[in-house]
Each structure stands twice: as C-alpha cells, then as structure tokens.
Image (cartoon, rainbow, N blue to C red):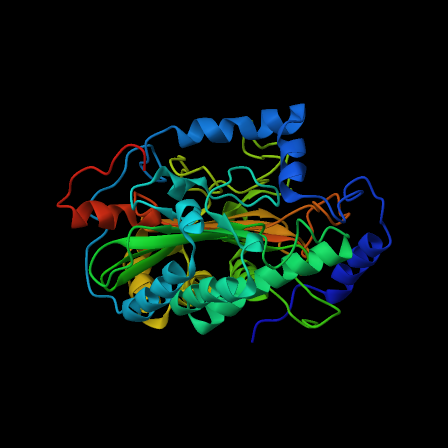
Amino acid sequence: MHRSINPPVFSYILIFHCCNSTGHPRTAGLDDIDIYAYSKDIINKPKPKQLFGPWLDLLKQPFTGITTDGIRREGLYDLADEGAPTQEMVAAAKLVQDCLSSEEKRKACYDIDAEEWRQWCNPEFVFLDTGIRLTVLPQQKIDLVLGLLKASLSPSGYEKAVGSMRTNHFLGEIVHAKSILNQHSYHFSLFGEPSETKPWGFSFFGHHLCLNIFVLGKQMTVSPAFVGAEPNVIDSGPWQGLTLLTMEASSALELMQSLSPELQQKAQIYKKMHDPAMPEGRWHPADQRHLGGAFQDNRVIPYEGIAVVDMTKGQQEKLLSVVATFLNILPSEPFKARMRQIESYLSETYFCWIGGFGDEDPFYYRIQGPVICLEFDHHAGVFLLNAEPAKCHIHTILRTPNGNDYGKEWLRLFRGGDKVGNST
C-alpha cells in the first residue's frame, strides 16, 4: 500500500493564511472582476508580456512533436482496433453539437487540421480565447459537454478531471476570486465531425486541467494532457475530503526510495528544486521544472537520469505502476493498449529526479521513452502563499513524443502517410 506523502495539515496551514489574506496583493480586487478584463490587464503588463510572448513564436513553428535530439523517430505508431468507446463518444459529441446555437458553433467548432488544437494553456487568465468558455453556457449545455468528457475517460479519469475543476473552484473561494477561478472556467473546442470511422476530437482546457482528445476509429489518445491542483486537498465545503494526484506522488517516491544509493545519485540530476547548477532556460517562472508544457510541442528533451534497464525487475514494475497513475485517465482498453506499447520500449526508457527524496521533500520527476514523456512537479504558490515548492501545489503533464500528440501521427497514417499541414 502506498503511504500518503501529502500531509493535510500543511495544506490547511497555507489555506488558513490565504483565507485570512483578503486584500493580499495577489488577490486584491478579484472578487467580481471580469475574466477578460483581468486577462487583458495581466497580458499587457511588461513582465508577463516578456514572459509569455515567446509562446506565440512557438505556435508559428510547424508541428513535429517532442524529440530527444530534434529528429523525429518514425515507425512507432500504427493504426489498430484498441477498443476505444467510440460509439459512446460520438453519441455524446452529437448531443453537444445539437445543443449549440449557430454562434456557439462558430466559436467552438473547428476543422480537424485547425491550428487551434495547439492553443491550449494552463494559466487562470485567458491567453488565447480559443473555443467556447463554459461560463457563458447555461447549465444544461455545460452538462452535455461534461457528458462528452465522461464518455471519453475512464471512471477514475473522469473523477480526476472533475476533481481538478473542483479544487480550482475551491481555490477561487479561499482567495476570493470566484469570477476567474471556478469549476466552469474552462474552454471547449470540437475538431472535425464526430464519426465512428473518421478522425475527430476535442479539447477542454483551463486552469490546472487541459485535455486534448483525438479519436480515429477504435483508437484514441488524451495527449497532451495537463492535470494539476492548488491546493490538492479540499478541507471544507461540499467536496470536503477530495484529494488529487497523491498516487502520482507516492508511487514515484516509493520507486526513488527503493533504488540503490548509486542509482539514486544518478537519477537525481539536481539536488535543489531551483538549483544554481541548472543551465539557463532549465527553470521557467511559469513552467518551473516542466519541459513539456503548453506550446512546447516541438521541444527537444534529451534523456536524463538512469536507464530503466538498470533497475531490478521489481523496480521496473514500480515504474510501470507510476506510468499507470497518469494513463488511468484512459478508458480500460485504450489504457491496456498504451501500457503494452510503453512496456515494449522499456529498454529505451529513462527516469530522472529533481529535489530531495525524503518523505517530506517536494520533488520533480520525469519518465521518458520513445512513446511516452510524463512529468510531475511540486510548485511554489501562485495564489497560495508558499514561496517555495510545496506538496499542496502539483502539476502533471503527459506527452506522446515523436509526433503523436493530438493524434497527429495516426492522422498522417490515416491519410496514407502524407505530411500533415504546417498549420497543425
């Protein structure tokens, strides 16, 4: 059994400070502010403009996918029947289509090759106003969008997604910013025409939850995927007791602590979370230690740490258990197919760690191979008051390297191997 490494008391202390900090510079005046006015104010300030400006430059680059050396590896992905719940997903998607007005469809619906696929991002402000924001829809239509999400994920995956939305709402309550942080502050886009045989998909993104779901026949992927929480524990209200991302943390720590001292030393690429030894660009004010976040579709991420083949059989099984905590968002048959694929490349997979690995230490880790790149990071506070990384603020990212984020390699194969358009 995995032990808890997220002491609730620590989260509660931070929450207590926030609850008693109305008027704090981070949250002053956010009680009733319009999200678009709030976003415009943030984006136009000199420091954020300098920070986020490069994101737009990255979007202009033709999509190739995350690689280890800048060269995309071919032959990793095939078209197959992987048991995706396509019929249920199509039925749910058509209910959404039918409920939207002409203007709402104009806002939410795109071609399968639209560049808007790549415009998702995690901040609470609106950086690119892509898709339709749930807050402008009546509850009946919101429920249908959530019905599509539910049809597309495993039961535990749906609970994880909804849990992220609920912790976002809880954060809005405790920092008095419910107009920008709530369970409906997310954008929805539909790509292509829902079909049981042809490619289509949708995106659902906002603060601490970004899911890109591509469907082709009986195959599907949820990638890129971003799930996070600040705080990851709800200690009051109707969702009291909800915790998020604890298994992703505890299973990886158990793996790291099981390694020999020699392997621990090799796996730990930096001892401190913001280590002076890090080269320029290795730590980012927004992404912190993450490398595969929003707009990083073509990033070169070299392997680091230790090769999984150097682990014992038991440790390799622990590593696959860590991978499963990320992939269990998928329905059961696609989950099994993806796990088999990852296991087939285990001899080319690497594991690295940043930070300490005592029970109370915050940390970052990455598991990376030819067909998987997943990251976990404990962050400093954005709305909570911890200036250093803490276990109550978590970001996780899942990527499919070498061209199959957004299902783009499957799409290319479906079209006979032709290149996907540069705008995608």
Q: Position of residue 327 (x, y in %)?
A: 42, 62
Residue 212 visible in rendering: no
Q: Which residue does the image show at 68% across and 64% down from the upper left?
A: 233
Q: Is residue 128 depicted above or below 102 in this figure?
A: above
**Residue 158 in sight from this viewpoint:** yes
> Which residue sits at x=73%, y=66%?
8
Of 31 and 206, nearer the camera is 31
The N terminus sits in image quarter = bottom right
Please give left or right for residue 16 compared with residue 261 in the image.
right
Residue 63, how many percent across, how many down?
33, 35
Q: Residue furthest bottom?
A: 1
Q: Residue at x 55, y 61 (%)?
A: 138
Q: Nearer the viewer, residue 423 or 8?
A: 423
Residue at image location 16% in from the left, 46% down from the top: 415
Residue 123: which quarter of the image? top right
* Residue 84 occupies quadrant: bottom left
